[in-house]
Amino acid sequence: MSASPNTADVLIFDLDGTLIDSAHDIAAAVNEYLASKGWPEQDPAFVEGFIGNGPRRLLLDLLLAVGLPHDDATVDEAVPTYIANYERSPARHTRFYAHVKEDLHRLREAGFRLGLCTNKPHALTLKVLDLLGIAPLFEAVVGADAAPACKPDPAHLLAVCERMGAPPASVAYVGDTAVDQATAAAAGISFHVVPWGGGSLLKVDEAFRLDRLADLMALKPAAARRTA
Ligand SMILES: O=C(O)COP(=O)(O)O
């Protein structure tokens, strides 16, 4: 069962599709790989639909969907090539969704502790957060390869909780995909969905649907509850 939506001390965020629109940089890295094989490049809006399960699934699912070779050997070779392409230019086109940066600051100032749980590779995640100037806002960041198992395995989200010393009942997870939603449900953590990324496609109780991140202020952290 999920925790109540009424309070939370710790807010853990997904990254791609939730805080940042990274589809153009991810598509550029994918297209550089496809071009190197002499295969047709893909539209960023199409590539965007495959983001959320990490690089291996991104490439496997995309190659499968467009009818290109997708055997293990092809994908094994594609993953490091794609990651190397992405690492060369991790935030050229990446943008925050509306009000994200200011709202993260407001949430921190209100006393919430912030964490990040993403299927992006860990080193790339740190690089992107740093380039976008939001790395210091997060107490714990766990990319897919820094977790015991990645989303939708609840161990990923629970690893962030553990690093923050936060019981799951004190946490809310914020994401945009069915993977994020399933992860939170399996971890027994309440899930709030953003209106962008894949968020509008998800079925959730309306009380858990955000217009912007600042709506999470309603969850009042412990410090604010004591002084209320
Ligand atoms: O699939 C990825 O690379 C990252 O996706 P996430 O930040 O939505 O977990």
Image (tube, rainbow, N blue to C red):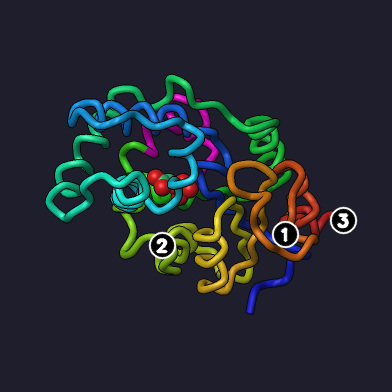
The mark lying in front, picked from 2 and 1, is 2
- In-image side of 205 versus 192 (left or right): right
In terms of sequence position, does the residue under pointer 3 or pointer 1 come before the other? 1
Question: Residue 123, position in %: x, y?
Answer: 31, 39
Question: Residue 39, position in %: x, y?
Answer: 25, 32
Question: Residue 53, position in %: x, y?
Answer: 40, 53
Q: CA distance from mark 2 to mark 3?
A: 34 Å
Residue 213 visible in the snapshot: yes
**Residue under numbered circle 1:** 222
Q: Which mark is on residue 172? A: none
In terms of sequence position, does the residue under pointer 2 or pointer 3 come before the other? 2
SS assignment at label 2 = helix
Residue closest to the eye, 107 or 146: 146
Identify the image quadrant of the C terminus.
bottom right
Assess disc 1: are there few (<14), some (14-19) or many (≥20) residues with their C-alpha within 10 Å of its C-alpha.
Answer: some
SS assignment at label 1 = helix
The answer to the question of whether label 3 and label 1 lie on touching residues, with beta carbons closer than 8 A, is no
In terms of sequence position, does the residue under pointer 2 or pointer 1 come before the other? 2
Question: Residue 17, position in %: x, y?
Answer: 55, 42
**Residue under numbered circle 2:** 156
Q: Residue furthest top?
A: 92
Eyeballing the image, is 106 above or below 190?
A: above
131 inside magenta stretch: yes
Q: Which residues are magenta?
A: 125-140
**Residue under numbered circle 3:** 228
